[in-house]
Amino acid sequence: EISGPVRTDFGWHLLQLVDIKPPINISFEDAKAEIRKYMVLPKKNAGVRRATRRQYLTGLRQKYAVTINQEVVEAMAPELPVH
């Protein structure tokens, strides 16, 4: 199932539903441990995620013959939020 276009602060996106997991009931302590894991994990694996994302996007650009209009990118750059 793929959504229609969705606009965010970062541009337009298509979302694909790939899985629905049934809800589970867990204790507060177990939930806290899971939340901590997800809060720490992104910091530890940021480089790996960037490389994986770059590789994925490169593959998409090759597969679908994406052309980037550099003039438009440069014109929009001042509008993009800095994180």
Image (cartoon, grey):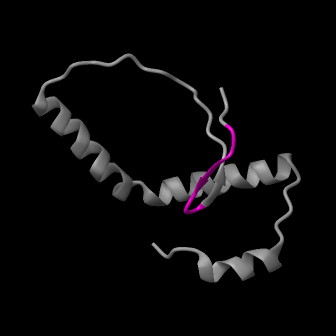
Give the quadrant of residue 70: bottom right
> Quadrant location of residue 72?
bottom right
Q: Which residues are magenta?
A: 4-10
- The image position of residue 73, as x and y in percent, is 74, 75
x and y percentages locating residue 51 in the rendered image: 58, 57
Asked if 18 appears above or below 73 in the picture, the reply is above
User: Residue 27 location in percent, x, y?
Assistant: 13, 25
Quadrant for the N terminus, please: top right
Look at the picture and state if 34 lies above or below 53: above
Q: Position of residue 82 (x, y in %)?
A: 49, 76
Q: Nearer the viewer, residue 28 or 40?
A: 28
Q: Quadrant of residue 29?
A: top left
Quick check: is 1 in the magenta stretch? no
* Up-down relation of residue 49 to residue 21 (above or below): below
Residue 65 or 25: which is nearer the viewer? 25
* Count of picture labels: 0
- At horizontal 54% and vertical 58% (from top left) the residue drawn is 50
**Which of these two is toward me, 44 or 57?**
57
Q: For the point 89% across and 53% down, which residue is it?
A: 65
Which residue is at a point 19% across and 33% down the rendered structure image?
A: 31
Residue at the image position 80 percent from the left and 54 percent from the top? 61
Query: Seen in the image, is 77 located left or right of residue 39?
Result: right
Q: 30 or 44: nearer the eye?
A: 30
Q: Quadrant of the C terminus?
A: bottom left
